[in-house]
Amino acid sequence: MFLKWLLALVLIAHGIGHITGVSAFWTTLPMGFNQNPWIFGAGGTLSSLVGRIFGVIWLAATIILIAAGVGLLTNQAWWTNAAIIGAVVSLVAIVPWWNTVTLGVKMGALLDVAILAGLLTPLKAWVFQVFKL
């Protein structure tokens, strides 16, 4: 039971962590992101239109990952789908801005990869056994 709560809290915390991206793209609050353009060229910066659009993607990742954690805590069958979709949306939000984001965000991308590996590969059976899901 403890590990289930821990996994749910990790999902929720990861979702909340995406608020940094929302804030970086939609406010002037310092979030630690640098002003380097996205990986596709100089046209995409935090304050550009493409940056604002990605701010919405960061917000979607926030909502989906928090929902996945809450779904896990409340024993909803859909929590795994939400976690998978949330991890994919998170990677879509992070990877194009790899040169801009903080080390913590890059670690979040590694967590996304772990979520996908744990839920989309044969590791899923092991994850469910260890976490008693």
Image (cartoon, helix red, strand yellow):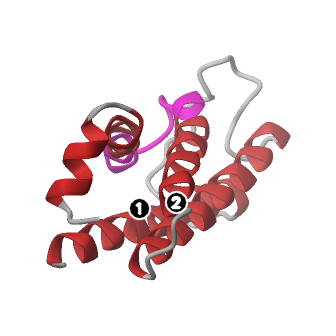
Q: Nearer the viewer, residue 13 or 82?
A: 82
Mark 1: which secondary structure? helix
Q: Nearer the viewer, mark 2 or mark 1?
A: 1
Q: Residues within 10 Å of mark 2 (few under 14, many from 20)?
A: many
Is the C terminus in the top left, top right, bottom left or bottom right quadrant? bottom left
Which residue position holds label 1? Answer: 14
**Residue 119 on the magenta span:** no
Residue 123: which disc?
none
Q: CA distance from mark 2 to mark 1?
A: 7 Å
Q: Residue furthest top?
A: 41
Q: Answer yes or no: do the residues labelled 2 and 1 have beta carbons within 8 Å?
A: yes
Tally the marks.
2
Mark 2: which secondary structure? loop
Residue 43 appears in view? yes
Is the N terminus in the top left, top right, bottom left or bottom right quadrant? bottom left
Residue 18: which disc?
2
Which residue is at 26% across, 55% downward?
128
Magenta span covers which residues?
A: 95-108
In the picture shown, does residue 112 fall above or below 67? above
Residue 30 appears in view? no
Which residue is at 32% across, 73% downward?
9
Which residue is at 57% across, 63% downward?
62
Q: Position of residue 116 (x, y in %)?
A: 41, 38
Q: Position of residue 93 (x, y in %)?
A: 60, 41
